[in-house]
Amino acid sequence: MRRRIVSTLTLKAWRDVLAHKGQFISLIVLVSLGITSYVTFQNGYHDLAASLEQAYSTLRFADLTVRVERMPLSAARDIARIDGVAAARVRTVRDVGLELENGDQATARIVSTPGPSADVNAVHVEQGRFPAHDARDEVLLSPQFATDTKTRVGDRLVLRIGGERVAVRVVGIGTDPEYLYALQSEGDLPSPGSFAVVFVTERTVEHLLDTSGSGNDVAVRVKAGFDPARVADEVERRVRPYNPISTAMRDDMPGHVGLQSELDQNRLMARSMPALVLIISSMSLFIALSRLVQAQRGEIGLAKALGYGDGQILAHYLTIAAIVAIGGSALGVGLGLWGAQGIAASYVSLLGLPFLTSGFYPHVVAIAVGLAFVSCLAAAAVPAWSSARLAPAVAMHADPNRSLAGGRIPIAERLLSPVLPRSFTVRVPVRNVFRARRRSLYTVLGIAFAMVLSVTTVAMFDSIDHLMDKAFTEVERWDVMAAFSVPFGEARVAEVRRIAGVERVQKAFIMPVTLSARGTDKDVVLTAMAPDADFHGFTPAGGAAPFDALAAGDLVLSASTARQLGLVPGASVAVDSPLVDDPVLMRVGALSDEMLGQPAFVSLDAAAKLIGSQVTEYNALYLDADPRRAERIQDELYDMPGAASVQVKAGLVERLTSMLELMDFFGTVLLAFGSALAFVVVFTTFTANVTERTREIATMRTIGEDNAHLTIMITLENLLLALAALPLGIWLGVKATDALFASFTTESYTLKAYISPGSILRICLLMLLVLLLSEIPPVRRIFRLDLAEATKVME
Amino acid sequence: MPSDDLVVLRDVRKVYRMGDVEVQALHVRELTIRRGEFVAVLGPSGSGKTTLLNLVGGIDAPTSGQILFDGEDISGFSDRQLTLFRRENVGFVFQFFNLIPTLTAEENVRFAVDLASRDGVPPDRDPKALLAKVGLADRVSHFPKQLSGGEQQRVAVARALAKNPKLILGDEPTGNLDFRTGKLVLSALRDVNRDEGAAVVLVTHNMPLAAIADRVLHIRDGEIASVEINERPVAPEDVTW
Ligand SMILES: Nc1ncnc2c1ncn2[C@@H]1O[C@H](COP(=O)(O)OP(=O)(O)OP(=O)(O)O)[C@@H](O)[C@H]1O
Ligand SMILES: [Mg+2]
């Protein structure tokens, strides 16, 4: 008997699913969206990591390199015999000049290599071929530079070596594992147009650089199971006769570090993005299933009256939830695996990896299916349990929607009433909004959740744009900045002022210092400048006005530094400068909210104490300049003795922007998810709204209301609810963005969620469009309603 | 001078098709409902009573045959025409009341007044007066769920009156009510029929109720089996069952 009851309920579960096909399909799609995003991003990440690993192993990436003054090529054999070394190769690595078509000069890094067959750092040829071993002017060029400068196979490059111009021919495009991600030095932003890697044979390098059987670098691959650091020690010992200069483990190689940081970012995204999608889809699922169960309260009461137990009823709804979970995870895993291929392929090509490995990762699928089940079962269990516990009579009479506060007309509605048109076409929707409160709440929450993902995506971009915009217009108020490793005096300042295009020169002395207060130390970069210098914009965050503080000889600290050291304006802090023996006590005069890094500022006069003498020399210049001449000015500055780095703000902005391309890519994918999610959630909500009221709407139609007016009423009601939902959705989205940022904010930059008014407008319009589109299917249902049927059934 | 016939059915059939099986729910060779007439429809469950009402009220279309309302054939009407037809001519009272849950009693009635006035018919009906007529003067601002079943049904009657219809259709309006409340609803219908001249077609399972009608149709297996004319209709207050 018991078994029979259970199977009847299982049958009912299937019937329910079939009877509400549209609803269930959208629930399944909802679940699948979360699962799809999880599988897509996770699988994409694993594919990317595997692709990188494959490139490293196929191209036999060195575990370490040691730079020396000069060593014979034959010394490699000796090093290869070290315990733990799989292979070693002596090569030449040298930076030379490279003439660009516009007359500027780029850096070319010449790297000698036997080519694709090398047993350490083999090259991968993408296009053309590797230089012939007997040729003397053939080179293989790195793809990033080739793409950026539109250099093709067959083109000539002019190198500047020791004052001479030497022409070489590009016979192929490709790279080795060390330069997959072509960075000149660590911490650089990629600047594909100004850094080329030129791979040449030993014969060619001998011709170009006169190396005669020697090299200046040894690349070593370590056997599996050996500790590269220990091997490195031994290699260093063996190369001592050749005057070693530096050793680089993989973690010191700029390209590897760059790729790792891309991979790390990707992993972060692959975790936080699906988490967001999953949270939103679970919330929406929860609401949708709650409504479904609510709507079936009558049936639940009936089932209980017939003698079904609470557990059986719970099992019934869990069965339905399991059906949704199975459907959702099947669809989600399928779509996710398909999407992951796309993501991995685009990412691999964006990063310029030579291989694409796509794998199947059972643990990703297992976690995805687990997540689908947990979220579905949890979403169903709560409302099902609370309904099952109702007394049968209460359940049978319980009304899902008529939760009118004590049967009184809500005050808000009464206040609104006098200004509304008399027409019921306007009044009924307004009344529904205030009176069918549960439905209104579900709808508002539904629409708001539906927006969160899109809002978050847009807000992420807006926030970064906003940060960049503020950083480069309000904070960094200069056009060209030059840092010198050798300090200079006023003569140099005057010289710079004379460069054509330079409008104004501000000087500064920048030094690393250690701040200490209450036993806490903090290393910061201290800029000494004239109190009225304005190349850096402050965002006052306490204390005196920053410029007054500087004029008074006090420090201006970034608010986050002050927080870390427990300092308030007026407090004293010990400043330890490398230029004087004892720390100097200084007063904190003002705080500033800094977005990038944790800079500190002081006046040139006050800095005397930290330098040990009156400041008459400087090591940094901030120029206002004609932007069209910025590049020229940069070249002239670089030609000055001791110039360490010269930055053109416009170029910096451009490079940062191009780095954001990867973000754009994620953003596009996320927006697609966001829109799909919004549509499904709003559609589910509206369909439930209409389904729940089938009888009411059928009655209206029966007594003579026409489709047009009904459509207006429903649209008006939805728009009114949207009016409440849009601000809530935007607020939730911005909060979610903040939470997301909190997960990847570091000391070096502080991101605050920001969304521009334009984006808000666009999102609202987009949502209204989604709203109107999602309304179509339920409204069509109304048009097709069988009045005879709908008015006779009991609810 | 309009004819005395309000509704005329000629050879009307309603066939439901479910897969290969056809069910003939109703076949009426000839039926006329006159203005101001009170007709009761009696018959066992599944005999076709509701089907008849749905066809006459324009919420369902016949498979074949003609339905003339005020001389106009509504059987070929489009959805839009049927909507206007119902709005202007027919008042419905359902077995399950079907009030709009988010509107108060008065607003439920006003909704119908509003509808009727949309096409230029003067909204001369005061919802409060209509509710008073069915004995609910002191319940105007109650929501349906705050009303008893009988009260809800009387609001439904008031709503049906709102447009001053030529025809009121009631499908077992007392089916869910107790004896005393049922009689109140019937009185309300009878009064409307008397005072406003609206024809009433009342479907019921209850033989004794038919005593209040001018004419009683007996339906069996989708066909009108017999017609009985009541020379002396009983006042609803005097019916017993
Ligand atoms: N939508 C439908 N599809 C198929 N058959 C239908 C449909 N609606 C009604 N029927 C059939 O038509 C016949 C007449 O139905 P109708 O609803 O008119 O009966 P009724 O006299 O009102 O019965 P009751 O007194 O039980 O309300 C029945 O046999 C019924 O099964
Ligand atoms: Mg019936």
Image (cartoon, coloured by chain):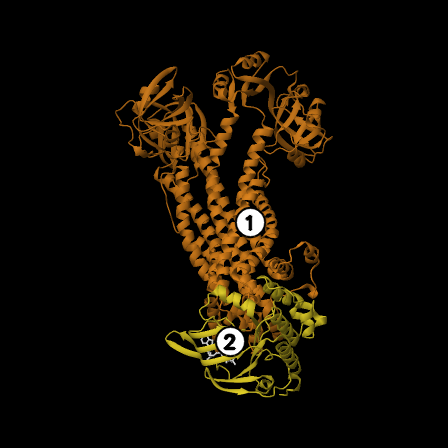
Q: Where in the figure is residue B90, as x and y percent of width and height? A: 56, 71
What secondary structure is marked by label 1?
helix
Label 1 crowd bin: few (<14), some (14–19), many (20+), radius 10 Å? many
**A716 shown above or below A408:** above
Q: In the figure, is residue A557 to the left or right of B166?
A: right
Name the residue tied to disc 2: B7
* Disc number for residue A153: none
Q: Chain of mark 2?
A: B
Q: Which residue is nearer to you in this view: A243 or A249? A: A249
**Chain B appears what colour?**
yellow
Q: Is residue A239 visible?
A: no
> What is the quadrant of the C terminus of chain A in the image?
bottom right
Q: Which chain letter matches label 1?
A: A
Q: Amino acid at mark 1?
A: Val
Closer to the observer: label 2 or label 1?
Answer: 2
Q: Mark 2 near ligand 1 (CB under 8 Å)?
A: no
Q: Check the image and report above or below for A444 versus B148.
A: above
Q: Is residue B206 above or below residue A557?
A: below
Residue type marked 2: Val
Q: Residue furthest top?
A: A491
Give the left or right position of residue A251, taking residue A385 as reference.
Answer: left
Residue A28 can be seen, yes or no: yes
Near mark 2 (Cα within 10 A), the count class, few <14, some 14-19 or many ≥20, is many
- Give percent across and percent down for residue B14: 44, 76
- Towards the viewer: B122 or B201: B122
Residue A67: which quarter of the image? top left
x and y percentages locating residue B43 in the rendered image: 51, 84
Q: Nearer the viewer, residue A643 or B102?
A: B102
Q: From the image, tell me which residue sits under label 1.
A: A452
Q: Is residue A121 left or right of residue A526?
A: left
In the rendered image of the structure, the colour used to display chain A is orange
